[in-house]
Image (cartoon, rainbow, N blue to C red):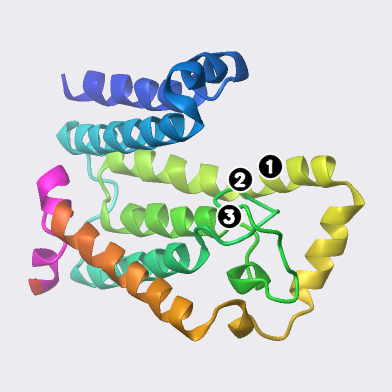
Amino acid sequence: MGWIEFIVAFAVFFASHMLPVRPHIRERIERVTGTRGFSIIYSVLSLAVLAWLIGAAGRAPYIEIWPWAAWEVHVTHAAMLTACMILGLSLGRPNPFSFGGGSQPFDPVHPGLVRWMRHPVLVAMTLWAGAHLLVNGALAHVILFGLFCGFSVIGQGAIDRRKQREMGPDWRTLNSARRSQSSARTAFGRNELVLRLLAGLLLFALLLVVHPLFFGVSALALTLF
């Protein structure tokens, strides 16, 4: 049953991400739920299916590709903390180059993290997948996190190409402007910066707490080895 569940969970994961966002399907759902309702339902569904998929990978037959080592846990924690801080500093911020940005106009003079990365959410996903790929050397986890890591890297190029078509010459103009800034510190007021850093830390702490609840393994306990 282990491999069957893993394959089914993968199929459901991709279907749950591809079908609801198709224009004609999304329009029908939004007539009932509204745009905000659709976003909430889609987010909850995505997280639930992702949790199932990761759990299914853990229940798949264990075939070791590389052995576990204690130092990998510390690298994973550092990468996850970095990913959480990236999300804390980028979500809701204006970003015409990718998704996850706010609705306010983008100011290339105050680009925030976009100064260094056009796709903060995908960079965070790459860190998440790469860190978990390192610390999980079983075949099912290698397939799972390897695919996520690959998709998040390839996706950045795909979004760049799509945005260049949509924005035309504006894409190159904004891209050159945001890269020319010597600092991103002025993107936030002091209070907002502190709140966003705290949000990143709280997200990291929350993930540590819920990890054993959803996946049966304590991320904190592993550091004791």
Q: Say whether marks 3 and 1 touch (CB < 8 Å).
A: no
* Residue topped by disc 3: 102
Q: Position of residue 184 (x, y in %)?
A: 63, 80
Whether residues under marks 2 and 1 lie with C-beta atoms below 8 angstroms apart, the answer is yes
In depth, the one of 180 and 129 nearer the eye is 180
In front: label 3 or label 1? 3
Q: How many marks?
A: 3
Which residue is found at the position 66% from the left and 85% from the top?
A: 183
Bounds of the magenta segment = 211-223
Q: Residues within 10 Å of mark 3 (few under 14, many from 20)?
A: some
Q: Which residue is mark 1?
A: 158
Mark sitting on residue 168 = none
Q: Find out whether residue 177 is within the magenta segment.
A: no
Query: What amino acid is at disc 1?
Result: Ala
| Viewer can see residue 218 | yes
Which image quarter is the C terminus in?
A: bottom left
Q: Residue 154 shows which numbered tag? A: 2
Rendering coords of residue 64 (x, y %): 23, 45
